[in-house]
């Protein structure tokens, strides 16, 4: 393994250039439909898909790590990743079959920015990426799949892109409804964002995108607040209201995932990782790892090899 290999960020456009990613059924600037993604597990051990990723497991099963936690998806499960998660170490059963839909962040943002609770709903899948569809929900999914397939077989006409985009928007809202249903079943209540202004919601979205793109190079809330031309106190208030977490919590969680990936997917020493992530010294880095991963960097690496 390459010593410096870390998390590979895969943009929506990368799938358009990739000839061997799987059976590409349809692709435009905002949406991609692929029949098979098994190549990801062989070539990309740690991948952040910077897009909305929706996959329905038709047959078999897949086990993968999502943000360092092991998840298993079986036939009938829906896998949803919102672009903030890291996927790694996927293992598939011999009969594995999956339908995959990738939607660009740009298109998702255009849709959810008008909805008070949509962003919080997408954030919920950070810790709950595997959903079990009810019979009715599978019927909705199957209907969309059938409509998409029929649509793709039709001759292209001047309104094709607009009509397809309309179906895409409807599908996103139905995925949101599935997530919300599971959330209610678990008794988890979404934070109240009805009083949050559109500007505040847009600012929180920008903060989250900045944080992901930053690759854990900056650790302070003040840095991101400065980038957004607001005060740290204001960022903390709107972030907590909109997502249920403070900026510090989001930054810390991203940092922990970055460290976990670097320890597992590279051979960089603890000192080198500490330097790359701008910790004051290796001792401080070691204490941070013990506090959040429950063991020393060396012990964590040995346990996960």
Image: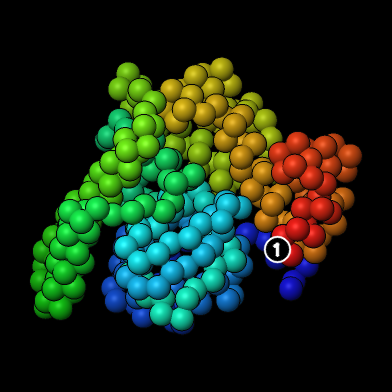
Q: Residues within 10 Å of mark 1 (few under 14, many from 20)?
A: many
Q: Position of residue 15 (x, y in %)?
A: 43, 70
Residue at 40% over, 64% down: 74
Residue at 47% over, 68% down: 62
229 sits left or right of 122 in the view? right
210 sits left or right of 164 in the view? right
Quadrant location of the N terminus in the rendered image:
bottom right
Asked whether 63 or 248 is in front, the reply is 63
Residue at 11% over, 76% down: 154
Residue on which the image places disc 1: 265
How many numbered circles are shown?
1
Note whether residue 7 is visible.
Answer: yes
Q: Position of residue 178 (x, y in %)?
A: 28, 47
Q: How is the image coloured?
A: rainbow
Asked whether 160 or 252 is in front, the reply is 252
282 sits left or right of 80 in the view? right
Residue at 54% over, 41% down: 210
Residue 305 position (above or below residue 118): below
Query: On the image, which quarter does residue 58 sit in?
Result: bottom left
174 sits left or right of 300 in the view? left
Residue 111 position (above or below residue 236): below
Asked whether 241 or 76 is in front, the reply is 76
Asked whether 124 or 58 is in front, the reply is 58
Q: Position of residue 235 (x, y in %)?
A: 52, 24
Quadrant location of the C terminus in the rendered image:
bottom right
Q: Report helix, strand or loop for mark 1.
A: helix
Note whether residue 279 is visible.
Answer: no
Q: Position of residue 132 (x, y in %)?
A: 33, 54
């Amino acid at each position: 393994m390459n010593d410096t290999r870390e998390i590979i960020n895969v943009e929506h456009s990368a799938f358009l250039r990739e000839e061997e990613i799987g059976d590409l059924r349809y692709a435009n600037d905002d949406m991609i439909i692929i029949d098979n993604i098994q190549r990801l597990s062989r070539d990309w051990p740690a991948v952040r898909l910077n897009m909305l990723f929706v996959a329905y497991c038709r047959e078999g099963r897949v086990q993968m790590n999502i943000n360092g936690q092991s998840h298993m998806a079986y036939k009938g499960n829906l896998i949803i990743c919102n672009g903030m998660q890291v996927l790694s170490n996927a293992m598939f059963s011999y009969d594995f079959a999956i339908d995959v839909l990738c939607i660009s962040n740009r298109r998702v943002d255009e849709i959810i920015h008008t909805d008070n609770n949509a962003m919080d709903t997408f954030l919920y899948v950070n810790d709950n990426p595997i959903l079990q569809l009810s019979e009715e929900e599978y019927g909705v999914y199957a209907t969309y799949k059938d409509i998409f397939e029929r649509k793709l077989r039709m001759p292209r006409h001047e309104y094709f892109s607009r009509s397809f985009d309309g179906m895409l928007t409807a599908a996103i809202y139905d995925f949101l409804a599935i997530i919300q249903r599971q959330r209610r079943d678990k008794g988890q209540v979404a934070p109240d964002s009805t009083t949050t202004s559109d500007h505040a919601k847009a600012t929180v979205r920008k903060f989250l995108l900045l944080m992901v793109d930053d690759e854990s190079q900056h650790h302070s809330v003040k840095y991101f607040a400065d980038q957004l031309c607001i005060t740290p106190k204001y960022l903390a208030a709107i972030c907590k209201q909109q997502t249920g977490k403070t900026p510090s919590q989001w930054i810390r969680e991203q940092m922990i995932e970055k460290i976990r990936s670097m320890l597992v997917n590279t051979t960089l020493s603890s000192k080198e990782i500490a330097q790359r992530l701008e910790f004051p010294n290796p001792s401080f880095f070691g204490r941070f790892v013990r506090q959040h991963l429950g063991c020393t960097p060396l012990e964590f690496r040995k346990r996960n090899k």
